[in-house]
């Protein structure tokens, strides 16, 4: 089964520099429909997230789960589903952390658990760390201009071989148009 790996904040939902409450989580226009199309076309969708807010105690694991549940509840209305959510709860200042993006360990763990080869698997994000993690793990980094992606494009920080899309829906349209 083909797999697509997504970041959440800035790709599926608004990036608010740490989501303090379930009520504040809002999907980006077209993102839930795009995931629905992936699911309906036989793609396995998996999320890979840095969640430093857990380390900083800005919100609890219960809040984190409630945000994901809200997202999945909205997603179900479009026939979409998320097969798994992998996350790193460590702070960016945690020198002992091996799972936090841009390191590849979270993606490699995902590959082992799902028994997939990451070569060519699209890994969609809005930050340089998403791109670096995907590349280091052997996946295909994809940048969207939502979230922080537009700033990366404007600052000319996108590697030449990384495809750039306006948003998740544009990426999915292109992906499904190729198959």
Image (cartoon, grey):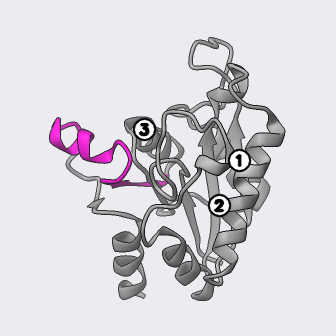
How packed is label 2: few (under 14 Cα within 10 Å), some, or many (20 or more)?
many
Residue 158 visible to an observer of this rendering: no
- Rendering coords of residue 5 (x, y %): 56, 59
- Check disc 1 and report its element: helix, strand or loop: strand
Residue bearing mark 2: 46
Which residue is at the front of the view, 66 or 10?
Answer: 66
- Check disc 3 and report its element: helix, strand or loop: helix
- Rendering coords of residue 100 (x, y %): 60, 30
User: Residue 123 vs residue 80: left or right?
Assistant: left
In the image, what residue occupies the spot 76% across and 59% down? 69
Residue bearing mark 3: 132
Which residues fall within the magenta stretch?
139-158
In the image, what residue occupies the spot 72% across and 28% down? 54
In the image, what residue occupies the spot 59% across and 38% down? 19
How packed is label 3: few (under 14 Cα within 10 Å), some, or many (20 or more)?
some
Of pointers 1 and 3, the one earlier in the residue sequence:
1
Above-or-below relation of 40 to 13: below
Residue bearing mark 1: 86
- Asked if the residues shown at circle 1 and circle 3 are in contact, with their CB atoms under 8 angstroms apart, the answer is no
Of pointers 2 and 1, the one earlier in the residue sequence:
2
- Asked if the residues shown at circle 2 and circle 1 are in contact, with their CB atoms under 8 angstroms apart, the answer is yes
Corner quadrant of residue 73 = bottom right
As drawn, which residue projects farthest toward the front? 23
């Amino acid at each position: 089964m083909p797999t697509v790996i997504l970041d959440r904040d800035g790709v599926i939902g608004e990036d608010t520099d740490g989501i303090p409450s379930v009520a504040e989580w809002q999907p980006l226009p077209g993102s839930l429909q795009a995931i629905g199309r992936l699911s309906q076309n036989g793609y396995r969708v998996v999320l890979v997230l840095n969640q430093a807010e857990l380390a900083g105690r800005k919100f609890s694991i219960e809040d984190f789960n409630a945000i994901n549940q809200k997202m999945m509840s909205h997603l179900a209305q479009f026939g979409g589903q998320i097969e798994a959510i992998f996350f790193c709860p460590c702070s960016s200042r945690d020198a002992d952390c091996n799972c936090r993006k841009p390191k590849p360990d979270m993606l490699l763990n995902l590959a082992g658990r799902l028994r997939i080869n990451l070569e060519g698997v699209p890994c969609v994000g809005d930050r340089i760390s998403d791109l670096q993690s995907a590349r280091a793990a052997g996946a295909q980094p994809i940048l969207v201009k939502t979230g922080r992606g537009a700033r990366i494009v404007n600052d000319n920080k996108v590697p030449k071989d990384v495809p750039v899309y306006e948003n998740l829906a544009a990426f999915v349209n292109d992906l499904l148009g190729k198959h």
